[in-house]
Image (cartoon, rainbow, N blue to C red):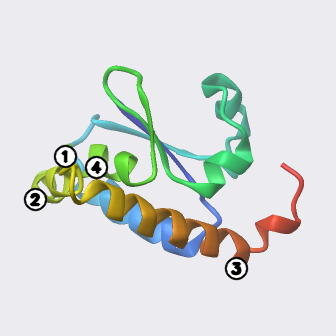
Amino acid sequence: MITVLYDGKCGLCCREIAFYRKIAPKGRFQWIDVMSDKESLLTFNIRQRDALMALHVFDDDSRCLIGVDAFSVIWKAIPGFRSLGYFVSVPVIRPVARWIYAAFGALRFRLRGYHYCEF
């Protein structure tokens, strides 16, 4: 099972996760809102601040993947999105996708006002 840790107070994140939940194969994912289920973060040994900065996914082998790599795992497991998952994994594309994701994540983090919070 793939475990997805996401920010449940971010409207964009919630809409995207709701979409994936709707189309994902049943029983393939566990979805954890890190804002309402902080206990899970202890289980995974992840700080809430880190979980809010970027999407975290634990794949079938219990490896933790973050950001674009996390999305790649999700996309590869959802029919119709597999090609996208493999595309962002291409060695020439991955660094660019990671940079874009990191820049967007930092901006989203600041706009949400999380930089004022103590995590």
Please name the amino acid that badge 1 sits on: Lys
Q: Which residue is mark 2?
A: 80
From mark 1 to mark 2, how far is it between C-alphas?
9 Å
Q: Residues within 10 Å of mark 1 (few under 14, many from 20)?
A: some
Which is more foreground, mark 1 or mark 2? 1
Marked residue nearer the N-terminal end (2 or 3): 2
Q: Residue at coordinates 40% horizontally, 58% vertically from top-left?
A: 98
As helix, strand or loop, the secondary structure at mark 4 comes to helix
Which is more foreground, mark 2 or mark 4? 4
Q: Residues within 10 Å of mark 2 (few under 14, many from 20)?
A: few
x, y percentage for residue 96?
34, 64
Judge by depth and name the residue closer to the eye, 4 or 54: 54
From mark 3 to mark 1, how far is it between C-alphas?
30 Å
Q: Which residue is mark 4?
A: 72
From mark 3 to mark 4, how far is it between C-alphas?
25 Å
Marked residue nearer the N-terminal end (2 or 4): 4
Q: Which residue is mark 1?
A: 76
